[in-house]
Amino acid sequence: MDGTDTEPVLASKWDLPLALFSLIRVAFGDLPVWAKVIVFGLVGSVGVWTAVSWLRGRRSPAR
C-alpha cells in the first residue's frame, strides 16, 4: 500500500443527492426564514413553469 492504487472509486447512487443537499444546507442554513421562503419560492415557481411549458410542448400537434 504505497498510495499508487489506480483502482476506480465506485460512487453510490446517493452521492450526488447527498452532496446537493449538503450544499443547499450550507448555502442557505444561516439565512432568515423569510429569505429562504423567497428563494425556494422562486426556484419552485421556475420548476413549475418549466414543467408546464414542457407538457404544453408535448401536447401540441407536431408541425
Image: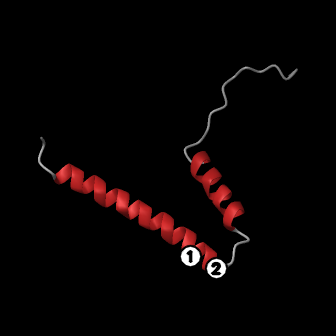
Distance, label 2 to label 1, CA atoms, is: 6 Å
Q: Where is residue 60 drawn, in percent x and y?
A: 15, 51
Amino acid found under the numbered disc labelled 1: Val
Residue under the point 64% across and 60% down = 24
Quadrant location, the C terminus: top left
Q: Where is residue 57 drawn, in percent x and y?
A: 23, 51
Q: Are marks 2 and 1 in contact (CB under 8 Å)?
A: yes
Quadrant location, the N terminus: top right
Instruction: Answer with left or right where residue 49 lies relative to residue 26.
Output: left
User: Hey, which quadrant is residue 53 in on the image?
Assistant: bottom left
Disc 2, SS = helix
Q: Nearer the viewer, residue 18 or 38?
A: 38
Residue under the point 71% across and 61% down = 26
41 relative to 47, above or below: below
Residue 33 circle label: 2
Crowding at label 1, few (<14), some or many (≥20) Cα neighbours within 10 Å?
Answer: few
* Residue where numbered disc 1 is placed: 37
